[in-house]
Image (tube, coloured by chain):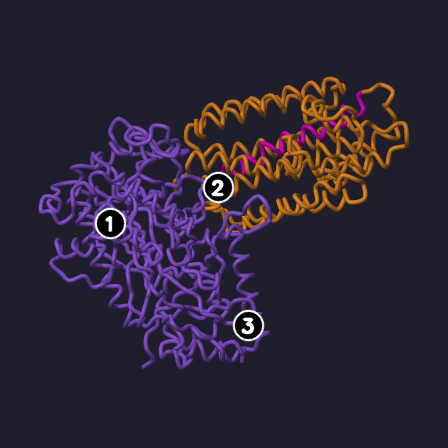
C-alpha cells in the first residue's frame, strides 16, 4: 500500500485540526459552564482561554480587552486564530478536500457538512444563548467524523497518520485543559475551597471523564488525583498517557521511526516521573510547558521523517 | 400528458428523438411514451430527484466552491438522448479509424515525417504550430500510440448524419460527467432500465486502467500507475481524483514525483521512493517538465521528459500529441486517414476553410455572416465567432484578427445541428446537442458506448460549452428490441 508523503501529511493535519476543533469546543463549553457556577468575584477571567492557546500575541493584534464577547469571538469564529474552532474546521476541510481519494466517501461529506454548519453559525454563536448548542453540535459532528474514520479506515498507513494526528493533538489539548485549572487557581487570592472542586469537575466534564473519575475516586473531585487521572491513567482515552501509548503503537510499523520513537519515549518517561501529588501548581504549570515543547519536537520529527520536504 | 409534447417542433432541424410528424423515433419510442405519460407534477418530482442526486453525489464527487454552491459545471437534463446501437456501431468504427490514423500521424511527425515529405500536409502548418514539440523528436512510444485518451467532439446534422467537429488529444476531460449522468438517470428513471437494453458505461475506469497498464515499458503485470493533477484549483480536479480512485491509482501532484539520476520517476512516500511506471498526466505539455518546457512551471516534474525519452516511464497522453489537435491539421484528417490506412474515412469532417490560404481567406472574409470562425488552437469556446449570430462589430473585429494572423484562424459553415427534447422550466423544447465520446488507444483500441452529451440550454444557441450556458444529458446506446 503506497502512501504519498503529501497525503500522509494532509491526513495527519486533518486529524489534528478536527481534534483541535472538538477539544476547543469541549473546553469552551466547560469553561462557560464553570463561570456560571462560580460565585461572582471569584470566577477566573476570560483571558485564560486565550492564554492556554498561547495566542495572547495574535489576540492583542485584534482586540484590546479580554471580555467574554471578544474572547469568544476569537475562539469560536475568528479565522486569524489558528487555535480557533472555525479556523480549525476550515483547515481540516482543506486537508480532506485533497485526500478524498484515500478516505471513505463519507469523510468529505461529513467534514463538508461540519464546515457548512460552522460557516453558518459560528458568528451567531458567540453570545451565551446559542453558544451551548453550537459547541455541542461541533463536538458531536467532530465525533461522527472520527468515529466513522476509526470504524472504516483499513489499518494501513492512512490510518496510522490519522491516528497519530488525533492522538498528538489530544495529548496537547488535555495538557492545556489541566493548565486551565492550574492557571485559574494560580492566583493566590483565588484559592478557594468551595470553588476549587467546581473548577476541576468542569474540566473533567470537558474530557467526558467525570463518570470514570467517580468510579475510581468517588464523587468529590480533588486536584492532585484529577490531574494524575487525566495525565497518567492508561485506560482513559483522553489521558495524556493513553495518547502517547497509542502514538507508540502507530509509530512502530513505520519505516525510519527511530528518532521519532526516541523523542516519544523521552516524553513518556517525563510523564511517568512527574508526580502531581507532590507538585505545586507552579511546578505543574512548568511541567506542562516543557511537556508541550516535547510534543512540538515529536511533531517536527514526524514531519521531517515522513512528510514532503 | 404534458401539453408541450403536442406542440413540440424542432423544424428545420433534425430531431434525434421525435419525427417531423411528432411521433417518437423507433429507437426512442419507449422513453418518449413513458415520459409523455408523466404528469406535470411527476416530471417536476423527477427533476427534483435528479437535483437531489446531483447534490448528494456532488458532495462526494465535486469540489465545493467557497460558498455552499456546488461547483458542477454542467446542469443536467433528465431526458436521455437515445442513439441506436446500429448507428453507433458505424460511428465507433469511424472513431477507431480516426484514432489509429491520428496516432500514426503523430508518430510519423516525430520520426520520419514522411507525410510532410510526400506533400500531403504542408510542412509549415505542422512544424510552425505551437503544438509541435521538437523535444519529442525521435521518440517511439509503445504500439506507436501517442494520444492514448482522445475525446472527439461529434455533432449530428440533417438526416442525423454524424460529423467530427474536433479531436481533443491533449488532456480531454468530461468522462466523469458521462459516468455521473448515468448514475443520476438510474436513480431518477429506474423503470426505463427494465425495458431497455442500454449499453453500460461504467466500465470506463477499468478500461482506462488496462489501457494505461498496457503502456508499461517493462511489461509488468501490475505496473505502478499515477494520475498527475495540477491540484485542487484545477477545474477538473474532481475528475482526476475520481479516476484515480476508481482505478486504484495514486493521485499525485508535481511535488510528489521526482526523477532520479537513473532517469526513473519516483513518488515520495512514507516508505521512501517508489518507482512509477505509467503517468496519466492531466497537465499540459507546457507545464510538464520545467527542464524542457516552461521553466517557471511549478506543476510539473523536472526530468520527466528525460525519463520518458530514456524509456523509463510511459506518459499518457504522450508529450507532443497535441500536434494533431489543431484546427488547421483537422482540415487534413481525411487525407491523413487515406495516407496511412489506405481507407476511406468513415466519419465525415466539416468543410474547413484555412485562412492561411489566400483563396480560402478571401472566401471567409466575404462570407463572415454565414461561417463559424474559430482560432486554430484554443479550446473552451472562447474566441469563437458564430457568423449568423454575430454583430457587425464582431464580424469586423474577426476580419481584422484574421488578416493579422491568418494561420491562427479557420472557418466552417454553420451546421444545422440536431436537437433533442429537453425539459426547460415546465415544457419540453428542442435544444441543440453535441457528443464527446472517448477513445482509448493502448495495446487495444476501445470507444465508450456513447459519451458525454452536451446540450445548449439557451433557445437557438449552438454553443454547448459549460462556460457558455451548456448542460448535459445521459447518452444511451440502445439495442433494438428483439
Number of the front mark, 2 or 3 = 3
Which element carries disc 2, helix, strand or loop?
loop
Q: The residue tagged with tag 1: helix, strand or loop?
A: helix
User: Which residue is under mark 2?
Assistant: A98
- Mark 2 touching mark 1, by CB under 8 A? no
How far apart marks 1 and 3 lie (CA) works out to 45 Å
Q: Do tags 2 and 3 sit on the same chain?
A: no
Position above or below: B454 against A170? below
Left or right of B13? Residue A172 is right
Residue drawn at x 47%, y 36% as measured from the top left: A8
**Chain letter for the part of the structure drawn in purple:** B
Residue A115: image x %, image y %?
62, 44
Residue at x 45% of width, y 69% of height: B430
Q: Assess disc 2: are there few (<14), some (14-19) or many (≥20) residues with their C-alpha within 10 Å of its C-alpha.
A: many
SS of the residue under disc 3: helix
Q: Is residue A42 left or right of residue A238?
A: right
Q: Nearer the viewer, residue A186 or B374?
A: B374
Task: Please rate how many residues cluster around mark 1, counting C-alpha atoms within 10 Å: few if below 14, some from 14 to 19, many from 20.
Answer: many
- The x and y percentages for residue A65 are 79, 25
Task: From the image, tell me which residue sits under label 1.
Answer: B214
Q: Is residue B365 magenta?
A: no
Q: Position of residue A289 (x, y in %)?
A: 66, 20
Which residues, given as a range, are shown in magenta? A160-186
Number of numbered labels in the structure image: 3
| Chain in orange colour | A
Q: CA distance from mark 2 to mark 3?
A: 37 Å
Judging from the image, mark 3 belongs to the subunit labelled B
> In the image, what residue occupies the spot 39% across and 63% down?
B433
Residue lying furthest left: B118
Q: Nearer the viewer, residue B269 or A280?
A: B269
Residue B43 is marked as: 3
Chain ID, mark 2: A
Amino acid at each position: 500500500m503506497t502512501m504519498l508523503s503529501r497525503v500522509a501529511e494532509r491526513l495527519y493535519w486533518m486529524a489534528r485540526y478536527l481534534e483541535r476543533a472538538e477539544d476547543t469546543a469541549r473546553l469552551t463549553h466547560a469553561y462557560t459552564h464553570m463561570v456560571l457556577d462560580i460565585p461572582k468575584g471569584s470566577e477566573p477571567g476570560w483571558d485564560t482561554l486565550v492564554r492556554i492557546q498561547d495566542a495572547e500575541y495574535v489576540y492583542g493584534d485584534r482586540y484590546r480587552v479580554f471580555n467574554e464577547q471578544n474572547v469568544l469571538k476569537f475562539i469560536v469564529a475568528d479565522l486569524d486564530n489558528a487555535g480557533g474552532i472555525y479556523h480549525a474546521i476550515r483547515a481540516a476541510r482543506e486537508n480532506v478536500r485533497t485526500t478524498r481519494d484515500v478516505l471513505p466517501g463519507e469523510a468529505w461529506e461529513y467534514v463538508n457538512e461540519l464546515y457548512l454548519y460552522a460557516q453558518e453559525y459560528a458568528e451567531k454563536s458567540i453570545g451565551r444563548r446559542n453558544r451551548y448548542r453550537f459547541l455541542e453540535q461541533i463536538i458531536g459532528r467532530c465525533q461522527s467524523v472520527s468515529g466513522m474514520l476509526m470504524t472504516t479506515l483499513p489499518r494501513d498507513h492512512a490510518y496510522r497518520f490519522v491516528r497519530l494526528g488525533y492522538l498528538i493533538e489530544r495529548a496537547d489539548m488535555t495538557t492545556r485543559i489541566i493548565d486551565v485549572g492550574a492557571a485559574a487557581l494560580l492566583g493566590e487570592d483565588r484559592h478557594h475551597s468551595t470553588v476549587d472542586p467546581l473548577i476541576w469537575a468542569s474540566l473533567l466534564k470537558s474530557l467526558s471523564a467525570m463518570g470514570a473519575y467517580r468510579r475510581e475516586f468517588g464523587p468529590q473531585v480533588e486536584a492532585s488525583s484529577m490531574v494524575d487521572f487525566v495525565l497518567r491513567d492508561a485506560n482513559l482515552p483522553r489521558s495524556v498517557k493513553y495518547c502517547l501509548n497509542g502514538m507508540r503503537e502507530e509509530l512502530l510499523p513505520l519505516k525510519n521511526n527511530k528518532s521519532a520513537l526516541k523523542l516519544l519515549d523521552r516524553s513518556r518517561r517525563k510523564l511517568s516521573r512527574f508526580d502531581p501529588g507532590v507538585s505545586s501548581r507552579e511546578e505543574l504549570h512548568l511541567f506542562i510547558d516543557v511537556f508541550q515543547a516535547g510534543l512540538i519536537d515529536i511533531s517536527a520529527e514526524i514531519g521531517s521523517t515522513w512528510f514532503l520536504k | 400528458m404534458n401539453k408541450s409534447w403536442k406542440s413540440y417542433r424542432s423544424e428545420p432541424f433534425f430531431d434525434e428523438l421525435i419525427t417531423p410528424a411528432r411521433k417518437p423515433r423507433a429507437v426512442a419510442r419507449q422513453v418518449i411514451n413513458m415520459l409523455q405519460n408523466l404528469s406535470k407534477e411527476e416530471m417536476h418530482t423527477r427533476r427534483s430527484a435528479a437535483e437531489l442526486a446531483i447534490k448528494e453525489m456532488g458532495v462526494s464527487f465535486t469540489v465545493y466552491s467557497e460558498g455552499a454552491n456546488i461547483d458542477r459545471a454542467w446542469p443536467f437534463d433528465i431526458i436521455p438522448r437515445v442513439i441506436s446501437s446500429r448507428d453507433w456501431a458505424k460511428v465507433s468504427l469511424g472513431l477507431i479509424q480516426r484514432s489509429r490514423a491520428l496516432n500514426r500521424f503523430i508518430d510519423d511527425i516525430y520520426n520520419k515525417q514522411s507525410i510532410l515529405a510526400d506533400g500531403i500536409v504542408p510542412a509549415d502548418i505542422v512544424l510552425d504550430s505551437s503544438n509541435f514539440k521538437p523535444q519529442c523528436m525521435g521518440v517511439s512510444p509503445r504500439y506507436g500510440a501517442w494520444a492514448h485518451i482522445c475525446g472527439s467532439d461529434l455533432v449530428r446534422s440533417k438526416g442525423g448524419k454524424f460529423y467530427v467537429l474536433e479531436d481533443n488529444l491533449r488532456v480531454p476531460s468530461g468522462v466523469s460527467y458521462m459516468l455521473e449522468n448515468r448514475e443520476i438517470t438510474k436513480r431518477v428513471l429506474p423503470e426505463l432500465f427494465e425495458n431497455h437494453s442500454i449499453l453500460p458505461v461504467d466500465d470506463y475506469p477499468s478500461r482506462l486502467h488496462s489501457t494505461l497498464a498496457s503502456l508499461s515499458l517493462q511489461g509488468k503485470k501490475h505496473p505502478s500507475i499515477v494520475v498527475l493533477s495540477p491540484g485542487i484549483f484545477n477545474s477538473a480536479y474532481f475528475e482526476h481524483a475520481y479516476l484515480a480512485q476508481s482505478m486504484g491509482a495514486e493521485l499525485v501532484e508535481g511535488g510528489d514525483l521526482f526523477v532520479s539520476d537513473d532517469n526513473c520517476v519516483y513518488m515520495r512516500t512514507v516508505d521512501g521512493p517508489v518507482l512509477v511506471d505509467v503517468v496519466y498526466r492531466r497537465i499540459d505539455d507546457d507545464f510538464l517538465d520545467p527542464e524542457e518546457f516552461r521553466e517557471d512551471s511549478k506543476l510539473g516534474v523536472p526530468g520527466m521528459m528525460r525519463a520518458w525519452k530514456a524509456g523509463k516511464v510511459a506518459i499518457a497522453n504522450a508529450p507532443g500529441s497535441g500536434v494533431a489537435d489543431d484546427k488547421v491539421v483537422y482540415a487534413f484528417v481525411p487525407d491523413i486517414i487515406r495516407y496511412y490506412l489506405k481507407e476511406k474515412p468513415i466519419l465525415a469532417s466539416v468543410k474547413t476553410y484555412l485562412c492561411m490560404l489566400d483563396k480560402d481567406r478571401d472566401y471567409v472574409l466575404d462570407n463572415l455572416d454565414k461561417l463559424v470562425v474559430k482560432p486554430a488552437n484554443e479550446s473552451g469556446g472562447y474566441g469563437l465567432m458564430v457568423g449568423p449570430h454575430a454583430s457587425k462589430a464582431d464580424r469586423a473585429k474577426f476580419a481584422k484578427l484574421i488578416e493579422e494572423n491568418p494561420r491562427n484562424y479557420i472557418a466552417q459553415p454553420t451546421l444545422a445541428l440536431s436537437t433533442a427534447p429537453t425539459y426547460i422550466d415546465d415544457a419540453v423544447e428542442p435544444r441543440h446537442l453535441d457528443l464527446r465520446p472517448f477513445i482509448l488507444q493502448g495495446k487495444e483500441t476501445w470507444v465508450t458506448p456513447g459519451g458525454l452529451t452536451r446540450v445548449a440550454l439557451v433557445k437557438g444557441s449552438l454553443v454547448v460549452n459549460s462556460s457558455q450556458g451548456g448542460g448535459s444529458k445521459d447518452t444511451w446506446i440502445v439495442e433494438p428490441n428483439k
